[in-house]
Image (spheres, rainbow, N blue to C red):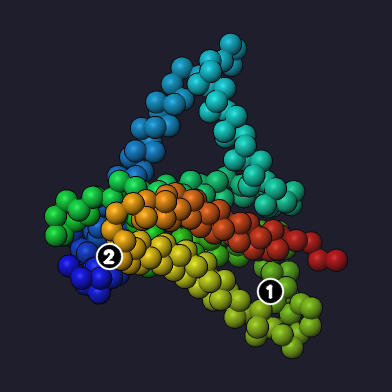
Amino acid sequence: MGLGEKLVEELGVKPLFSIGPVVITESIVNTWILLVIVLIACILLTRGFTVENPGKRQLAVEAFVTWVRDLTHSMLGDEAVGYSWFTITMLFFIGLTNLSALIETAVSDEYTFMKPPTKDLNVTIALALMSIVIVEIAGIHRKGVGGWLKSFTKPIAIITPINILEIIIKPLSLCMRLFGNIFGGFIIMELLKILVPLAIPVPFSCYFEIFDALLQAYVFVFLTSIYISEAVEQEG
């Protein structure tokens, strides 16, 4: 299969089966598998937790959770700290879906096991829309409907159309940045495999499939946190 055919295949959304009118695609199935893996991991890691005399496993898990919570708190700020669990969930979900490329395996012509769902533009659009809905809900909850509508006229009324346009620009920026970087990494790796098929692609693979995968998850959550903190910011 040539590079062009691979790119078309990666961009395509493969329907596997239907549940009534709902078409279940390759990305949805892989997302379900990831969620089951995370659920099982959480159950195994938290078994036997106690308030007194915690074991090493419990201390390690608590330290990791505390570190992630503090990380998201620092991005959100004090006024938006209540949304930290949403950002933590997004951070883990996007990070794990990106990292699933490490075990991506072609099972058949119709289905690729653990193909990262974030290679599907529909998934990144859904994540971006979810984020921007939370952003706007945060603004309404903090300022009320009247204050939220009034915020579109700040700092001066003449830029109201631009502020309204941001509701479209923000999720578009989020979804295209995530999709573009993940898909761009795939293109670079395929080119390297063609040009230098032996040892050279290995360090690049570590970069694009591990470091860049986690970096893109962080950037997505960081930008979402900034939008939330701006939405709940009190007017001076």
| Quadrant placement of the N terminus | bottom left
- Badge 2 density bin: few <14, some 14–19, many ≥20, Cα 10 Å: few
Q: Position of residue 234 (x, y in %)?
A: 79, 61
Where residue 22 sits: x, y (%)? 24, 62
How crowded is the residue under tag 1: few (<14 C-alpha within 10 Å), some, or many (20+)?
A: some
The answer to whether residue 122 of the structure is visible from this angle is no
Amino acid at pointer 1: Leu
Name the one closer to the observer, 211 or 117.
211
The residue positioned 60% from the left and 12% from the top of the image is 52
Nearest the viewer among 208 and 105 is 208
Q: Nearer the viewer, residue 171 or 205?
A: 205
Tell how many labels. Answer: 2
Q: Position of residue 4 (x, y in %)?
A: 25, 74
Above or below, 160 against 116 in this view is below
Could you tell me residue 39's position as x and y percent? 38, 36
Amino acid type, mark 2? Ile
Q: Is residue 52 visible?
A: yes
Q: Is residue 66 left or right of residue 34?
A: right
Identify the residue position indicated by label 1 in the image: 149
Which residue sits at x=56%, y=50%?
Answer: 87
Q: Is residue 171 left or right of residue 110?
A: right
> Which quadrant of the figure contains the C terminus?
bottom right
Per the image, the residue denoted by label 2 is 194
* Residue drawn where x is 68% and y is 74% of the image: 149
